[in-house]
Amino acid sequence: MSTLDVAIQLNAKGRFTEALNALNDEEHVPASRGEREVLRAELLERVGRFGQARAVLQRLSKSRVLSAGERSSSEFVLGKIDWEEGSTESAIAHLQRSVQLATESADLYRRCWPRLWLLVSLADRSGPQLCRSYPERSAQ
């Protein structure tokens, strides 16, 4: 089993630091490998190392070898980072791009999570006023 496979399994179990360590131990894979670097950015975001995650994604953005799913994941990570840093509008824009790119992917995870985050982000931004006014409109 490759270290990438080990890192993917650890990530799925929520063991983000261990997964990141497994990727860092990998020596014989070219640095430009998209799947590995996108996973690295995801893990860096999960452990709170936003600057490093953003740097990995900036390097990847110059690469034309990423699949639509990998580009979707990149936008998703950038959206989550921006949200945590308080850049709401930028976060929503990244999440919308992630959703758009994910529609080209057969990966259910990549199709669902960005949509869920976008829904929650838009609801959070709209506030409780939107929810309170809905029953009044439906009664008319």
Image: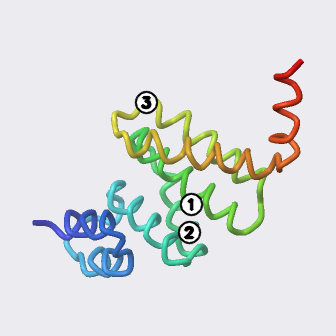
Q: Distance between the residues labelled 3 and 1?
A: 22 Å
**Amino acid on which the number 1 mark rests in the picture:** Gln
| Mark 3 or 1, closer to the camera | 3
Disc 3 packing (10 Å; few <14; some 14–19; many ≥20): some
Q: Name the residue under label 2.
A: 55
The residue sitting at the left extreme is: 1
Callout 3 secondary element: loop
| Whole-number angstrom distance, CA of label 3 to CA of label 2 | 25 Å
Q: Position of residue 54 (x, y in %)?
A: 58, 66
Distance between the Cα atoms at labels 2 and 1? 5 Å
For residue 60, above or below residue 9: above
Q: Which of marks 3 and 2 is in front?
A: 3
Q: What residue type is labelled 3?
A: Glu
At x 82%, y 31%, the residue is: 135
Q: Which dot marks residue 108?
A: none
Q: What element carries label 1?
A: helix
What's the residue at 31%, 74% (across, down)?
19
Q: Is mark 2 on a helix, strand or loop?
A: helix
Q: Which residue is drawn at 46% across and 42% down?
A: 112
Q: Which amino acid does label 2 sit on?
A: Ala
- Tell me, yes or no, whether the two marked residues, 3 and 2, touch with CB atoms within 8 Å: no
Q: Is residue 106 left or right of residue 9?
A: right
Per the image, the residue denoted by label 3 is 104
Q: Position of residue 87 (x, y in %)?
A: 77, 60
In-front residue for pair 62/53 = 53
Q: Name the residue under label 1.
A: 58
